[in-house]
């Protein structure tokens, strides 16, 4: 019970800080950050925990976004149902392609995912243009009905919903990290032979991780769709395939809060630097190289040990005190 | 449904696209085979080649001079990048080099934007002559591009099979430790391969410049196709790269004659299919597993 409270504490603190920053940061920016962090956590999990680098996350983002968009444009008006449809679409896509993809080596995996993203892009832009309206995109902001308790058709209430969803996602990933399954994921990354000897199937572990990560990504896509009220093929364009990977590395690969901090830093820097020097690529590219060469820890990966040291020093002191008391 | 003229020009068009893909992909393939890195920054050298071709052809009027300068500058830039970055990451696992080289590519695009701006630039075609093949007029420049790619393939084949350094590179693709054990300076071998790969990418960019508009994002646009060529052929295989470049070029070109919306997608579908049947690509060997 106490242990459960302790790890809830971290997540609640992180997101109440995010929520409190709504007082001085613009709401659209924070909405973007929260959705982006959910988008990234799947990629971070795949890269940091399972050792799969995916250049195709936009494909699953698009599955979620278009699932929601189709529902809200053609069938219904309830945004919650729309998000559910989007998540199910992402789940469906990853269940179909997962068994084929996770057999591949990690380098091929990255590229096959890239290929899938490009296929989805052309599918939505050209082949299915009758249904998706091609480059114009689907506009359905006026179709979204207001909902009773938490009206997510309004940006400020959507932000509360996004925060709650993010807390749920983070709690789930924290739970995964601490479970035996999380240990299996790490093992399949570092030494798949040993895991095999222990009686686990590498294939099953990877498949589950793939499905979980990409369903999370689809959730982010569905939230984008409801938040923006429009979806176009742009979200899966080949120029944006590496965004989640960049944010993952920026925040700290495989760490729990890396995606949140990475998304915050990435979105913030993009706004500030584009305004200041206007050459965003130059900055982010060399920053990426620098982070990788400096030990690929990212922002959170660098901060975490220091914070822990700060906390642990107090903790160690109280522990020593307790022992001292007991001895006396 | 398709007349002979259309077919011939389609095939030539496909071959010339395939040649460009081949020249870019060969560098990636060699780098993977020998150093076990995925060097996305080859696409940067491709853009560098194209931009120098633009600058020198508008300054001196000769596209060929620009292509040559593009190759040289691409080689020099790659030498600097190799010394600064890749020397430190050769022994790391693949995702590491993938992400780092992507950072170089993005940063390099920023540098290109800084020097040349974001406006797409046209490059004049060096020869406007048309050559008649079986009753169809075909632009001579596309034939020249195909010829250069053929020469490069022959050159690489001779280099790898007839020279000591080439043989060492081929042996290194099979097993780097053994080559090192024979007393060959592997790190110099890596440098030579990296620079040669970058020069070929620069050549591809320079040759492609008159066929398209030169813009900062051109490397990213071609990235997916070049990767597909490498994957279909099998990472590390020269012959496989040639075969798959021809296949992909034809699929893109002839596919757009049959049903345009599918033309961009078809190569990716083919790649997925080939990977599912043979996960190492057409000519990739299982030996390459590390």
Image (cartoon, grey):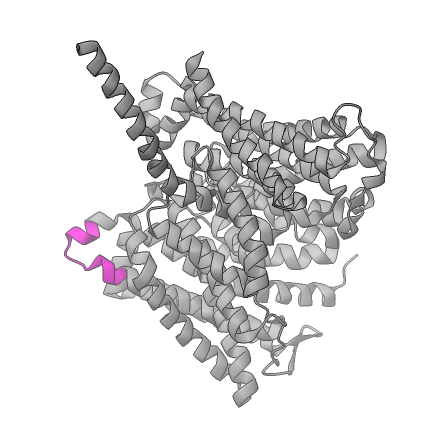
Q: Is residue A252 above or below residue B142?
A: above
**Can the viewer see residue B150?**
no
- Position of A74 with respect to B183 (left or right) is right
The total of numbered circles placed on residues is 0
Q: Please give the name of the residue rendered at 45% of the width and 22% of the height, measured from the top-left corner.
A: A7
Relative depth, front residue between B237 and A3: A3
Q: Is residue A14 magenta?
A: no
- Position of B79 with respect to B210 (left or right) is left
Relative depth, front residue between B205 and A35: A35
Q: Is residue A132 above or below residue B67?
A: above
When asked about the image quadrant of residue B256, the answer is bottom right
Whole-percent x, y for residue B89 in the image: 31, 52
When asked about the image quadrant of residue B17, the answer is bottom right
Q: Please give the name of the residue rendered at 71% of the width and 26% of the height, measured from the top-left corner.
A: A84
When asked about the image quadrant of residue A117, the answer is top right
Report the magenta residues as a range.
Answer: B178-189
Whole-percent x, y for residue B26 in the image: 43, 60
Q: Please give the name of the residue rendered at 36% of the width and 16% of the height, measured from the top-left corner.
A: A199
Q: Is the C terminus of chain A in the top left, top right, bottom left or bottom right quadrant?
A: top left
Q: Is the N terminus of chain A in the top left, top right, bottom left or bottom right quadrant?
A: top left
Whole-percent x, y for residue B8 in the image: 67, 66
Q: Please give the name of the residue rendered at 64% of the width and 31% of the height, measured from the top-left corner.
A: A90
Main SS class of the magenta portion in the image: helix
- Position of A4 with respect to A268 (left or right) is left
Relative depth, front residue between B193 and A47: A47
Q: Residue furthest bottom?
A: B60
Q: Is residue A104 above or below residue B38?
A: above
**Can the viewer see residue A126?**
yes
């Amino acid at each position: 019970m106490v242990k459960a409270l302790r790890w809830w504490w971290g997540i609640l603190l992180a997101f109440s800080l995010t929520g409190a920053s709504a007082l001085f940061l613009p709401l659209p920016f924070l909405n973007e950050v929260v959705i982006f962090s959910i988008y990234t956590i799947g990629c971070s999990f795949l890269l940091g925990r399972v050792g799969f680098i995916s250049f195709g996350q936009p494909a699953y983002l698009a599955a979620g976004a278009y699932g929601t968009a189709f529902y809200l444009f053609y069938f219904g008006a309830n945004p919650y149902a729309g998000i559910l449809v989007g998540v199910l679409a992402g789940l469906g896509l990853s269940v179909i392609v997962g068994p084929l993809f996770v057999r591949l080596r990690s380098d091929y995996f990255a590229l096959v995912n890239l290929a899938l993203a490009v296929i989805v892009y052309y599918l939505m832009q050209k082949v299915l243009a009758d249904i998706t309206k091609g480059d114009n995109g689907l506009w359905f902001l006026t179709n979204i009905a207001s909902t009773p308790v938490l009206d997510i058709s309004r940006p400020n209430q959507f932000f509360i919903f996004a925060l709650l969803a993010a807390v749920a996602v983070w709690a789930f990933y924290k739970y995964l990290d601490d479970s035996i399954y999380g240990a299996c994921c790490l093992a399949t990354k570092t030494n798949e032979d040993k895991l095999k000897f222990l009686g686990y199937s590498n294939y099953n572990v990877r498949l589950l991780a793939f499905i979980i990560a990409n369903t999370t990504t689809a959730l982010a896509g569905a939230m984008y769709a409801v938040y923006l009220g429009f979806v176009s093929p742009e979200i899966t364009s080949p120029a944006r395939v590496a965004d989640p990977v960049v944010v993952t590395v920026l925040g700290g690969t495989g760490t729990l809060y890396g995606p949140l901090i990475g998304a915050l830093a990435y979105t913030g820097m993009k706004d500030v630097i584009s305004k200041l020097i206007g050459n965003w690529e130059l900055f982010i590219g060399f920053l990426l190289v620098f982070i990788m060469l400096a030990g690929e820890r990212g922002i959170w990966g660098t901060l975490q040990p220091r914070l822990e040291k700060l906390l642990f020093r107090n903790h160690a002191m109280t522990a020593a005190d307790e022992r001292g008391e007991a001895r006396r | 449904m398709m007349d002979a003229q259309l077919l011939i020009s389609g095939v030539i068009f496909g071959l010339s696209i395939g040649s460009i893909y081949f020249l870019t992909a060969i560098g990636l393939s060699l780098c993977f085979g020998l150093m076990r890195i995925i060097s996305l920054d080859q696409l940067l050298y491709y853009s560098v080649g194209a931009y120098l071709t633009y600058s020198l052809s508008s300054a001196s009027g000769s596209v060929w001079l620009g292509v040559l300068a593009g190759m040289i500058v691409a080689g020099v830039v790659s030498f600097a990048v190799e010394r600064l970055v890749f020397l430190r990451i050769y022994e790391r696992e693949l995702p590491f080099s993938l992400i780092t080289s992507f950072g170089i590519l993005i940063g390099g695009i920023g540098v290109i934007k800084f020097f040349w701006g974001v406006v797409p630039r046209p490059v004049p075609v060096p020869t406007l002559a048309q050559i008649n093949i079986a009753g169809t007029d075909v632009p001579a420049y596309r034939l020249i591009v195909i010829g250069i790619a053929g020469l490069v393939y022959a050159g690489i084949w001779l280099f790898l099979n007839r020279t000591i350094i080439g043989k060492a590179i081929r042996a290194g693709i099979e097993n780097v430790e053994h080559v090192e054990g024979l007393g060959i300076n592997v790190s110099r071998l890596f440098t030579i391969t990296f620079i040669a790969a970058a020069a070929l990418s620069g050549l591809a960019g320079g040759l492609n410049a008159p066929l398209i508009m030169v813009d900062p994002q051109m490397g990213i646009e071609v990235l997916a196709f070049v990767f597909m060529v490498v994957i279909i052929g099998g990472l590390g295989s020269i012959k496989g790269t040639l075969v798959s470049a021809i296949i992909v070029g034809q699929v893109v070109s002839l596919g757009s004659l049959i049903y345009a919306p599918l033309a961009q997608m078809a190569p990716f579908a083919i790649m997925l299919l080939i990977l599912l049947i043979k996960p190492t690509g057409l000519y990739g060997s299982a030996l390459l597993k590390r």
